[in-house]
Amino acid sequence: MTNDLHEKLLSRKYKQDYTPPDENIVLTIGGKNIGCLQSFVCFQGLPKAGKSTFITSAIASAFTTWDIFGMKLNFPQNRKRICYVDTESSDFDYYRVLDRIRTQIIADHLPHNFDSFLFREDSPNEIQQMIELYLQENPDCSILVLDGILDLISDFNSVEQSFYLIQWLKKITKIHNLLILCVLHLGKKDQNSIGHIGSYLDRKAQSVLKIEKNKENKTIDLSATFLRSSDEFNPISIYYSGSSWTQAHNTKENTGTYIFGMEKTSLINRILFEARKYSEMLADLEEFTGKGSTTCKKVLKDWLLDGSIIKYGELYKQK
């Protein structure tokens, strides 16, 4: 026991000739450093506040060349795998969330380097064990998303259990060189982090982000409540335009528009790479977005009205 403790002490000691690794930034929002390897980031919000909308958009951004709602996940070199763990949803809601990711990356199928698990029926201990097994078998996984961190603990008001869970998060981020994105519900009465686990996450996370509905502006807003490694970013606001989620912009630097979480200009480039008939353009928009004909027709009408696309005889083209 004494020898083991002594070895551990020596392993923790400062080494003068040791060169630490470069800071490996994985998650940025508005160009700011939000999450690095060997750390975890907490997304907090009331139930139905829009946490899943932002989380799925962040995940999708790892598989696009553009940011989504100002968020961008960047894989570290040679470790291009994400694992998404859902501990709460019904089968219907779970697969709807996964389909939202597929739609946002404009693909027929989810990427081969995206893994997902639904652990709704499993105990906290079983969930942790299965996550560790997965990480051991998939060393190329660099991003782990825990959608429902409260289900990894049986009593979120227990100081002992909360401390153990935080230590477990710190351990696996170090051993497996991960960034973990945690999703946590806020208390309905006071809108504070739930229990001791919430308090621990607030203190130990690299960044704590809050998602809330703005009833006055009819938007869902993402803002920072704590950033350990960066200056604050401008809050991100999105609103439902009738056919898609669109980003509301407050600065000249942040002027992109998003359709179904996809950057508008990129989407138009995909369906109007040349002058095309309306039926061809509509068919491609339906295919790329996974949306129905009525919704896509409304999007095309909006683009015609705002001048993003123009009619040229019987054909349509970009402005």
Image (cartoon, rainbow, N blue to C red):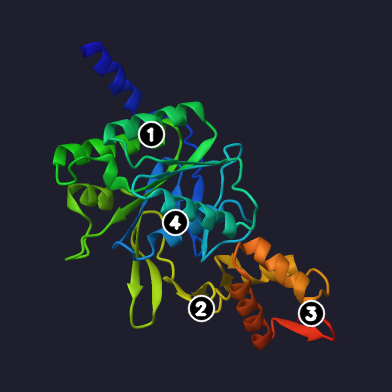
What amino acid does circle 1 point to? Answer: Ile
Earlier residue among tags 1 and 4: 4
Q: Residues within 10 Å of mark 4 (few under 14, many from 20)?
A: many
Q: Residues within 10 Å of mark 1 (few under 14, many from 20)?
A: some
Q: Residues within 10 Å of mark 2 (few under 14, many from 20)?
A: few
| Residue 88 numbered mark, or none | none
Q: Which residue is mark 1?
A: 172
Question: In the drawing, does residue 19 fall left or right of residue 181?
Answer: right
Dots 3, 4 in contact, CB < 8 A: no
Earlier residue among tags 4 and 2: 4
Q: Is residue 257 above or below residue 58?
A: below
Dots 2, 1 in contact, CB < 8 A: no
What amino acid does circle 4 point to? Answer: Ile
What amino acid does circle 3 point to? Answer: Tyr
37 or 217: which is nearer to us? 217
Q: Look at the image and tell me in which quarter the N terminus lies.
A: top left
Give the SS element for disc 4.
helix
Q: Nearer the viewer, mark 1 or mark 3?
A: 3
Give the SS element for disc 3.
strand
Dots 1, 3 in contact, CB < 8 A: no
**Residue 278 coordinates in the image, percent (x, y):** 76, 76
| Residue 316 numbered mark, or none | 3
Earlier residue among tags 1 and 3: 1
Q: Which residue is mark 4?
A: 55
**Residue 89 coordinates in the image, percent (x, y):** 37, 50
Alpha carbon distance from label 1 to label 4: 21 Å
| Residue 242 numbered mark, or none | 2
